[in-house]
Image (tube, rainbow, N blue to C red):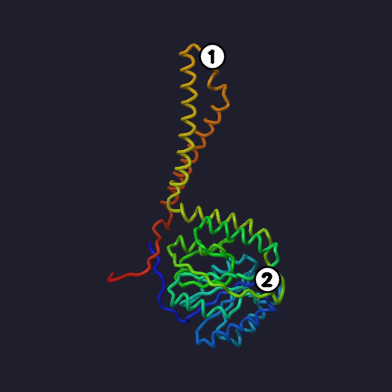
Amino acid sequence: MSKRLPHHFPVELSIVIPLLNEAESLPELTRWINRVLSQHGLTYEVILIDDGSTDDSWDVIEELASTDTHLRGIRFNRNYGKSAALNVGFRETTGRVVCTMDADLQDSPEELPELYRMITQDNLDLVSGWKKKRYDPLSKTIPTKLFNGVTRWISGIQLHDFNCGLKAYDSRVVKSVEVYGEMHRYIPVIAKWAGFRKIGEKVVQHQERKYGTTKFGLERFVYGFLDLMSITFVSRFRRRPMHFFGTLGSLSFIVGMLITLWLVSEKVWLAHQNLHARDVTAQPLFFLALVAVIIGVQLFLAGFLAEMVQLSGSNRNDYLIRDRLNLK
């Protein structure tokens, strides 16, 4: 089975905004977006995702949508997280270009027209914002720099700010990727491994928070690194798990067997020379070799079982097709 990527769009720009307890900022944000995009003559839609707010955010969204036909709203029954909000919002978009931004007014709508231009005229698949000058405390900026450095090293994508909420995507990207857990900060990584390699970056304005307080703590960096390991493994080995488990298992088995053969050979040679030699089973190295052999067999079997699961999966032949030509 294959997925065909969309080509026809009712609007030029879709803006997906996940939010949690941002009732104060929403009226100003939506007015700002309307003013900027109207000046540039862009047709657009704004999809507001209420991620289980406990304040009046949904009431504000309903009131704003009653007078502004550009606005659409989705309300979660409880807080599921930013990745879930983005994933649902992406499915609802109808625009040629999809932009994401935060609802706290720290992302400027003034950046949207240029982001749209970079996707449509520079033919980029994805543009990530870079908050070069930040208005955040050191407790947030220092871990962010470390996080970005590790992600650049592992992914090979030379972006300065993976965690910036202000991003623009060709619609084909958001319709082709799935975001879950805390994966929203790794959408460029997911997109690259899905074949969307034209990734750009734009320095964007970062504004001081005007309303409310930040919703993120230091634990997000711990979860972020774990998610990076997960997405790295899944993206590279989902369709060929035996390459990962089988390689590790084979190496462990071979090392264990070589150590065992060396110990046995040493015992035989010493006995042949009438020299005293400890029993093979009396040496700690033998038990380490035995553990390596057992682990090797287990890893190999894990790879074999994972391969069987993959072969029986309904999406084993699910590939992205960009275009078709002269095909019936």
Callout count: 2
Q: Is 95 situated above or below 318?
A: below
Q: Mark 2 points at which residue?
A: 135
Q: Which of marks 1 and 2 is nearer the N terminus?
A: 2
Which one is nearer the viewer's eye here, 169 or 328?
169
* 252 left or right of 60 in image: left
Graded by Cα atoms within 10 Å as few (under 14), some (14 to 19) or many (20 or more), the crowding at tag 1 reads few
Locate the C terminus and report the quarter of the image it occupies. Answer: bottom left
Q: Residue 145 location in percent, x, y?
A: 62, 61
- Amino acid at dot 1: His
Q: Residue 158 location in percent, x, y?
A: 51, 62
- Amino acid at dot 2: Tyr
Q: Residue at x 60, y 67 (%)?
A: 82
Which one is nearer the viewer's eye here, 24 or 316?
24
Graded by Cα atoms within 10 Å as few (under 14), some (14 to 19) or many (20 or more), the crowding at tag 2 reads some
Q: Residue 80 location in percent, x, y?
A: 62, 65
Q: Is 327 situated above or below 226?
A: below
Q: Name the residue under label 1.
A: 276
Locate the N terminus and report the quarter of the image it occupies. Answer: bottom left
Q: Which residue is drawn at 42% across and 58% down?
A: 315
Q: Residue 33 location in percent, x, y?
A: 58, 82
Q: Which residue is drawn at 56% across and 74% down?
A: 16
Marks 1 and 2, Cα distance to the nearest angstrom? Answer: 73 Å
Q: Is 320 situated above or below 41?
A: above
SS of the residue under disc 1 = loop
